[in-house]
Image (cartoon, rainbow, N blue to C red):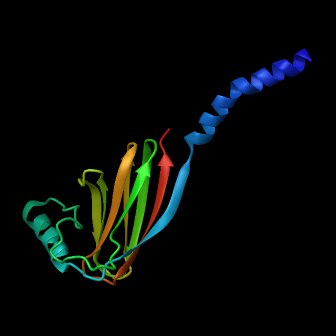
Amino acid sequence: MKAKVVAVTALLAAAPALTAVASAGQTTHGSWSFTDYTPDTAALAAGKALYVTTGRSDTSYCHGGRVPAAPQDVTSHRFRVPASSTLQLTGAASGAWGFEVDNARGATLVGAATDAAGSTVGLKLRVRPGTYVVRACNLGGAPTAQVSYRLASAR
């Protein structure tokens, strides 16, 4: 009987450590579909002009669009990060599309654009707990794009 009590006590003492190890490697993954029937070709041209004149890259292709969104457009997905993590995104579209990650206040943290048919773009950043928005906008391509994501806990 005493041996059973010791074994149960040892198991209960180890349970928090086992839970911490299990949650340390948590990974969430999936994909989002984006639709944008109103391409904004001026945003890509403005980004290229900024790079040529200043050497700086414009990472916020989807902010301040000159063309209003159509009612059926789906250009953003909001998500919550529960713990410090690494976010990895792969955007795929036919033609020119912009992809970005914004914080809850709307500031662009990272972004990139494709400008060739069938091209992909990869984004990777470390994020703290909070709310983020992944945006995708049509800069002159087909009306749909896909983004696959992987969120891996940094613990």
User: Residue 37 at x, y = what percent?
Assistant: 30, 83
In this rendering, is residue 50 above or below 128?
below
Comparing 121 with 76, the one in front is 76
Residue lying furthest right? 1
User: Residue 61 at x, y = what percent?
Assistant: 22, 67
In this rendering, is residue 123 above or below 86?
below
User: Residue 150 at x, y = what percent?
Assistant: 48, 57
- Dividing the picture into quadrants, the one containing residue 128 is top left
Q: Is 103 on the left-hand or right-hand side of 118?
A: left
In this rendering, is residue 84 above or below 56?
above
Q: Is 43 on the left-hand or right-hand side of 150?
A: left
- Dividing the picture into quadrants, the one containing residue 60 is bottom left
**Is the N terminus in the top left, top right, bottom left or bottom right quadrant?**
top right
Q: Is 4 on the left-hand or right-hand side of 11?
A: right
- Dividing the picture into quadrants, the one containing residue 3 is top right
Residue lying furthest front? 71
The residue drawn where x is 60% and y is 34% is 20
The residue drawn where x is 30% and y is 79% is 71
Comparing 92 with 13, the one in front is 13
